[in-house]
Image (cartoon, rainbow, N blue to C red):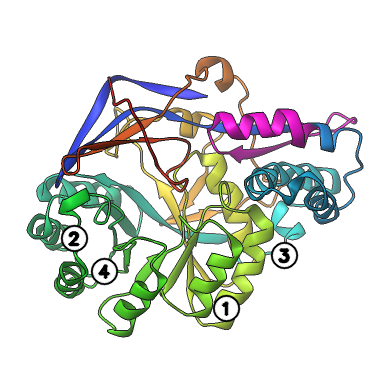
Amino acid sequence: MSFPFPQPIRLPFYGGERTILKRDAMFIRVEADNGLVGYAPGPGSEQAHRAIEQTIGPFLQDRTLADPDALRIQFFEGPGADTELAKTYCCVEIALYDLAGKAHGVPVSELLGGRVRDGIRLYGSAGMYMPPEAYAAEAAAVAELGFRAYKMRPALGPEQDLEAVRLMRKAVGPDFDLMVDAHTWWRMGDRSYSPVTVEQLARSIAEYNIAWLEEPMPPDDHAGYLRLKEKDIVPLASGEHEPSEERYLDLILTEAVDYVQMDVCCQGGYSLGRRLFAEIARHGLGFAFHSWGTALEVIAAAHLGICWPDYVCEWLEYPCYSSPSRAGMYPFPLAAEILKEPLELNHGDLLVPRTPGLGVTVDESVVDRYPWIPGPWSYFRTDSPAETRAVMSDHSVKWEPSGAGPV
């Protein structure tokens, strides 16, 4: 499914421009022979769609859903030996858990070990490449919506980025959490921030008591993260670009960051999350879900998160899209319309239903309202070197060079 913007959204940054053409989404539907249906969020990509249609769907045909874990092992011993195919299967597996929960009359959280709480803390996630005053206004608007935390994405140069944090703290006061997602700092070609600049900026930002600094360096540079963390300047977060369980374990076992991040929709589903949480708890680290898609993705992640205490799984990202009645990053109505009822929020927490399965009702009519539009959803252009990268699927998938740029 795709929601195209009436006009491309152009967001200049320090050394280039990002152009957003549309937002994509997927929901996965698995139907049992007794008529029960399970749903899951999926990455909005043609590759994932082909994998489900050609390999995963035929594998599941006529199988008995007694234990989702047993089915996954069978798949991994067969076609799922391919890493990317295995990740896509783990998306589909969320629908199997939804289906199993409905069949047994229990919420998905009970199938994942049992909930230890009913809610999980959210952080409102929005702002990208705006003047400092605009970030401050958006932070205040997110606070007005009832959230207790706000994450933004700066990339307008060190001085402007610092000014944005200063104004945000002034706008929301001392008792509100702020997160700085710096994933553009190392993507700006020759204008990318050097390690020295990153450290200096981290020290300045730390004065405003932020909850974490996210991905200020290339995510595969675990040694660089560890060096910065050992200086004890500001809490660090990373993980949404980790390509494998092995790389996650390296991030965790070296304790290179304070907060580990993962997207259940794109990076390994419930099975990987459960394994990682045990290691995260053992090493005294925190966890924060990455979630940049639909409300179905948010609730799917929440069922796993509430099976662990909040000192292990502390945060869940809640994308704040704009609408005629509220501020946000940009409009993406499909994100909410995928569910027939809105998620239940209470003082910045998401309350997870106790009804069977995921506890939500998917509105399948969104498929007709938002037909799929092939091609990249976004382009990322740097001035030096002159290069344009196409962004396919979720941004946790590595961006690839493209010979063509935005229209």
Identify the residue at image location x=92%, y=42%: 64
The picture places residue 52, in percent across and down from the top left corner, at 70, 33
| Residue 47 painted magenta | yes
Can residue 136 be seen here? The reply is: yes
Kind of residue indicated by mark 4: Ile
User: Disc 2 to disc 1, how far (Cα)?
Assistant: 32 Å
- Label 4 secondary element: loop
Kind of residue indicated by mark 3: Gly
228 horizontally vs 131: left or right? right
Identify the residue at image location x=48%, y=80%: 254
Mark 2: few, some, or many residues within 10 Å (few <14, many ≥20)?
A: many
Q: Who comes first in sequence, dot 1 or dot 4?
A: 4
Q: Who comes first in sequence, dot 2 or dot 1?
A: 2
Q: Which residue is mark 1?
A: 281
Q: Which residue is mark 3?
A: 114
User: Disc 1 to disc 4, how far (Cα)?
Assistant: 22 Å
Of the two numbered discs 3 and 1 in the rendering, the one whose residue sits closer to the viewer: 1
Kind of residue indicated by mark 2: Tyr
Of the two numbered discs 2 and 1 in the rendering, the one whose residue sits closer to the viewer: 2
Q: Who comes first in sequence, dot 3 or dot 1?
A: 3
Can residue 311 be seen here? The reply is: no
The picture places residue 136, in percent across and down from the top left corner, at 16, 52
185 horizontally vs 404: left or right? left
